[in-house]
Image (tube, coloured by chain):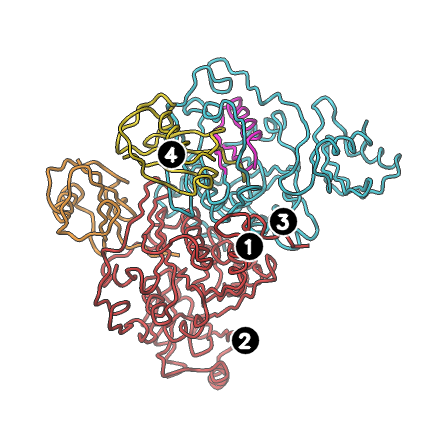
Chain colours: A red, B cyan, C orange, D yellow
Amino acid sequence: MSTDRYDKQVRFGAIGKSGQKKIREAEITIVGCGALGTTVAETLTRAGAGRIHLIDFDEVEWSNLQRQQLFTEEDAEKSRLKVEAAQVRLEHINKEVDIKIWPHYTDGPFLHKVASSSDVIVDASDNFDTAYVINDVAHMLGVPWVYGSLSGSTSIQMTVVPGHNACFRCLYETLTGAKETCETAGALAPAVQITAARQTVDIFQLITGSGACGGIFKLEDIWSGEHQKIRTHGMKNATCPTCGSSPAYPSFHETGGVSVLCGRGAVHIHPPAHRKISLQEGEEMMRRMSIPYKRTGLFIQGELNGHRMLLFEQGRMLIHGVSEPEEGKRLYASIFG
Amino acid sequence: MSTDRYDKQVRFGAIGKSGQKKIREAEITIVGCGALGTTVAETLTRAGAGRIHLIDFDEVEWSNLQRQQLFTEEDAEKSRLKVEAAQVRLEHINKEVDIKIWPHYTDGPFLHKVASSSDVIVDASDNFDTAYVINDVAHMLGVPWVYGSLSGSTSIQMTVVPGHNACFRCLYETLTGAKETCETAGALAPAVQITAARQTVDIFQLITGSGACGGIFKLEDIWSGEHQKIRTHGMKNATCPTCGSSPAYPSFHETGGVSVLCGRGAVHIHPPAHRKISLQEGEEMMRRMSIPYKRTGLFIQGELNGHRMLLFEQGRMLIHGVSEPEEGKRLYASIFG
Amino acid sequence: MIQVLYFASMKEASGLASERIKWQGGTLGEVMEKVTDLHPSISWDGVRVALNEEFCSGTQEVESGDIVAFIPPVSGG
Amino acid sequence: MIQVLYFASMKEASGLASERIKWQGGTLGEVMEKVTDLHPSISWDGVRVALNEEFCSGTQEVESGDIVAFIPPVSGG
């Protein structure tokens, strides 16, 4: 039946039968299930990877469909969790691959737990804060990670092998000022595909041990055609708090906070590490306060002052119709104090 | 509901609202619904194109799933026609886009008819013969076309604007000798994504009239990272039989023949132009010869000497379990003389 | 002459993907001053600079024929 | 020295994605002869040649510092 399923990949000399076997046994953690995450996850699933962890707390929106390839109109209509919608499609594509989903916010301790047995960690998030967290966790675990980012028609990709390459923090010790995000410059689907393709090639090279990825910052404007392969070696910082001789992993310990979601009029609250609220406790609280709610396997959906809100395990909450962090905090505090 | 559906594309300056309107009104013909065809079709569908024609006579196979992104295990299990399986998925992704499917072999007259009102023709086929046919038809119609090809980790892409650029025949007046195909060197999904991404950017530029595509042969080995943008201008041939001053369009008139399908042990027969057999006639013939068969909307499936065969409109036939063209011809002749 | 490449927000601020600039010699920092003169609306926040496909600091000497790329931070995924 | 890039089947036949070759001057055709000496199993059927990112014929002169790319036909989609 599916004997020649991976034939076109096995015929590629640098992979071959032994590479295919390594892909089959590989475990990969993908942080973010948006444009890059869905594309990389689909390719790895088609490629026959062993196990894929998909981390994302967000729901499918109409504006995602233009470039997030696993999702359909029905997923947006029903505001399905991205990781759930992705899992359903990926299992139709290849049921041999074990897809683990985590509708969670990515902080250091959480990622450290999920990715502890992964061979590669993939940054498919849409923000720098998460890249710093991945960079720290990857160095703590000694696992290579694959950075990717895009905006408009610009694509950036870089792989960091701990102990070998300048790390993300070496390149961006601090990041201040205006950052170009998909909000301001849009995001072209072909820029997504190029970024995800470069990420996937590096994942294949890391898993199969052939090819020499790492240490190159690949930059392309797919609209103008300008292209650069920039060596990062000169940026290596011997006293870097992530990859230097006395690492402190500053982003690992950052506690939760409030983030405003990209272009959605929604606020996402993740409580500090010492204050975990279970779904059980959340449900109890809502009942006590007579807040109308519905509980599913992964979250509780409720309504407070006209705002739709979703409460996840460990007390994370998504509040719609709010664009100011402070208002989100107030609403959160009105329930959990 | 879907007001901001294309928001991230509209925010991209070179597209904007007016570009989005042009995309919405555009008609695109895609020749081939394999790796490149499914990827380009999905991106254009998500982008909100007006109408997409998809041409391919083939069925989904297990070995397609590794890199052909619209298909699932069920499509392979049921040997669905590629264009039918693609249409179902594309309509789930964006029902605003009009997807027309053509389970046909691409010869000159057929393509000329299908693409007559298209703004762009896309080569997503897996062979040179079809590229020559597209090149001729595009010049007859005066419509730009977007070439793409790949093998292993190598990606090639080039856009030809009739009257402006050296054409495909200028570059490859004759093509002899060994050709590297997916059969010998395999085909990596990231090479597909890169090629399709470059094709889609050029489609966007042609449709929106911004950017300056055409005349550049883009070449990349995504595994090694080597990359070239080669100007084709010097190859322009003033007496080219396709784009020269007295065009003869030699590939337009080529009649049908027999082709052996890439790595499948199947033979595809397309009868010469003067000999068209309707599904009605085919059914009649099978009944008369007591060949067990089943008729669907688009084809008749029958069994002859243990070979599964599919008969399409106009007498095209796909015969499985045969790898020699001559044997295919014999089987075909045993029914239709 | 040196060739200067602008990416992401710098491409929008300059209105150019690339340009050639007359150059008699000097440091990367001086290239940045020159670019600021040409395109006053450019913001340098978080911008990284590559000289001939190698990340470099502002003290690096730039020679005629060199290629300088300016890369603002890009976040989206 | 010139830099030679091998793509697709030529990369497999040479076992290299690129290499540097000593060069005193001569035509593209002579570069091809040199490459055949180095890698006798290379097939030239249908190969197109680009010199400094421009398609060229075998009579073109090649100078030290130039980049030559060899591109065999590739069909797959």
Q: Are marks 3 and 1 in contact (CB under 8 Å)?
A: no
Vertical relation: D51 (above or below) A315: above
Q: Could you tell me which chain the residue with mark 3 belongs to?
A: B
Q: Give the image quarter of residue A246.
A: bottom left
Q: Amino acid at mark 1?
A: Lys
Marks 3, 1: nearer the viewer: 1
Real-space Cα separation, disc 1 to disc 4, in angstroms: 30 Å
Label of residue B201 in the image: none
Q: Does the segment drawn in magenta span residue B295?
A: no
| Residue B2 or residue B161, whichever sits in front | B161
Residue A327 x/y as whole percent: 34, 72
Indicate which disc, 1 or 2, sits on the residue closer to the N terminus.
1
Q: Are marks 1 and 2 on the same chain?
A: yes
Vertical relation: C38 (above or below) A22: above
Quarter containing the C terminus of chain C: bottom left
Q: Give the image quarter of residue A120.
A: bottom left
Q: Which residue is mark 3?
A: B88
Real-space Cα separation, disc 1 to disc 2, in angstroms: 49 Å
Q: Which residue is mark 4?
A: D69
Q: Amino acid at mark 2?
A: Lys
| Residue B11 or residue A257, whichever sits in front | A257
In the image, the segment drawn in magenta is B120-149
Residue occupying the point 57% across, 63% down: A97
